[in-house]
Amino acid sequence: MNDILLEIEKNPLAKQIATTVGIPLPPILKRYKGPWKERILEDKKIQVGGYGKTKVQEILATSLLKAGAQIYINPSIENSVRTIYEEARSGLGGIFLTEQDKYDSLVFDATNIQNPDELKEVYYFFHNNIRKLGSNGRIVIIAKADEDQKTLEGAVCSRGLEGFTRSIAKEIGKKGSTANIIYVRDKAEDRIEGVLRFLLSELSAFIDNQVFRVSNLVKAPKEIPFHRSLDRKNILITGAARGIGEKTAELIAQEGANVILVDHPMAGEDLGKVAERLNGYPILADLMDPESYNKITFTIKEKFGKLDGVVHNAGITRDKTIANMKEEQWDQVLQVNLKSILGLNQSLLDNVLEDYSHIVCLSSISGIAGNFGQTNYSLTKAALIGFVKHLSEQVAKRGITVNAVAPGFIETKMTAVLPLFIKEAGRRLSNLSQGGLPEDVGQLITFLMTPGSYGITGQVIRVCGGALIGA
Ligand SMILES: NC(=O)c1ccc[n+]([C@@H]2O[C@H](COP(=O)([O-])OP(=O)(O)OC[C@H]3O[C@@H](n4cnc5c(N)ncnc54)[C@H](O)[C@@H]3O)[C@@H](O)[C@H]2O)c1
């Protein structure tokens, strides 16, 4: 399962030999460890640019200072935004920097850009600063949602910035750095705080090239804690005995939640160990069996009374070309990856899921791009993208968010069995030229379970290191 090139990168002698003979090595990614801190950006040096005085600059000032970041304001906007930042600092404290040689992040507020000439500000900012972005750096661009632009020119500028972000991500990936874009709807500006904290910290090490759409579709929760933000929450994770499900359960438990862990009876021993380690509650259930849905729901009702989040993670593959696929292989994949999610989710919504809860489904790059020999699997994973889109609209008035996470190539038992050539392609054909780890997917899911993600619903976000496939 080990990535040999990453092992070489970690060993100084082997690295020297590889570099001498010209083998390109993937960057070592810095990943966040431990419970999420209130000041998650402590000591991060962040340069902020933009175009004019905007509501987003106000949110940037307070969010970054609250999270402990040190800020350098690009001279081109200094005059327009200085008072915003001074006011934020008078309440929150914090450090403003003079110009530095290196920054951990470059953040550009493009929400005021309305015509192609104004895009020149984006060019100047990144042209002048990209070499100052350190390794494992972050670029975040914030743009106005094209739906809210008043002119055609404005709308095309907003849309164009997605292409800019995707290309700049390719230029910085070899240093382990990432670029993502946030599209914010009018009056949803204050909802970007949680997204910024996630994207600018090491929580998002393998999230690259992604679009985060922030809207005010769901009702705002009363409190938005950023530390121990899942205290007293009950969260269900299916397929929790191993892989992505196990790691996600660990990260969710670390933020204070009671984790309720479902897996197949055949994985009972492993599930028991995970439950013991996380002080979680195991439920053995075969999602192949429709009777399992109510069994799970009523166990939760009896033991916990309510549920605050569900991660539909259990999934299987039965790969064959359509000509060679047996009917049972089709049926099994549709049952576990799709029908069980529809059935269990409805049962949970009707009986235990609280207002302001969060639903996350595990989709896949295969559901976005298709994959040879995976017609059954890709169908189910694409169906889940439709599921989150439509269900999110239905439950928004209850404050419930519904999103899909689409892993690219993640190092788990599911991918360990793939032929070496396919594994190597999965790892190298991405901006970060390596596979992700279960914790990379788990951190995004954990974020989507927290109140701070309330601006995000109905979306599919990839955890793929900027994979070329399906981009
Ligand atoms: N690993 C990847 O690269 C990758 C990529 C894209 C999507 N995904 C998706 O992420 C999810 C987790 O993937 P993983 O790699 O951790 O998989 P995995 O095979 O390691 O774990 C899946 C878990 O689901 C459980 N499960 C399977 N059938 C079940 C059933 N009938 N009833 C109850 N539990 C059942 C298994 O026992 C196992 O514990 C899946 O939905 C998968 O499709 C994974």
Image (tube, helix red, strand yellow):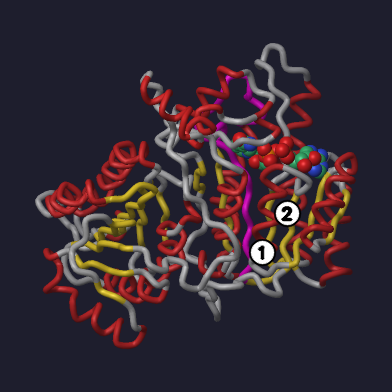
Residue 26: percent from the left, percent from the top?
A: 44, 33
**Quick one: 382 or 250, which is closer to the camera?**
250
- Label 1 CB sits under 8 Å from any ligand 1 atom: no
Within 10 Å of disc 1 (Cα), the crowding (few <14, some 14-19, many 20+) is many
Quarter that holds the C terminus: top left
Reading the chain from its start, which is encountered first: label 2 or label 1? Answer: 2
Identity, as a three-letter code, of the amino acid under mark 1: Gln
Residue 401: percent from the left, percent from the top?
A: 57, 62
Residue projecting furthest to the front: 13
Q: Is residue 287 above or below residue 261?
A: above
Classify the position of ligand 1 by quadrant: top left, top right, bottom left or bottom right: top right
Q: Are marks 2 and 1 in contact (CB under 8 Å)?
A: no
Q: Quadrant of residue 46?
A: bottom left
For the residue labelled by badge 1, is the local secondary structure a helix, a strand or a loop?
A: helix
Q: Which residue is mark 1?
A: 254
At 53% across and 72% down in the image, what residue appears? Answer: 226
Q: Quadrant of residue 301?
A: bottom right
At 46% across and 40% down in the image, what residue appears? Answer: 465
The label number, if any, that marks residue 220 in the structure image: none
Separation (CA) of disc 2 from disc 1: 14 Å
Residue 153: percent from the left, percent from the top?
A: 17, 51
Q: Which residue is mark 2?
A: 237
At 36% across and 84% down in the image, what residue appears? Answer: 92
- Which region is colored magenta? 356-378
Residue 381 can be seen in this image: no
Task: State yes or no: residue 372 in magenta.
Answer: yes
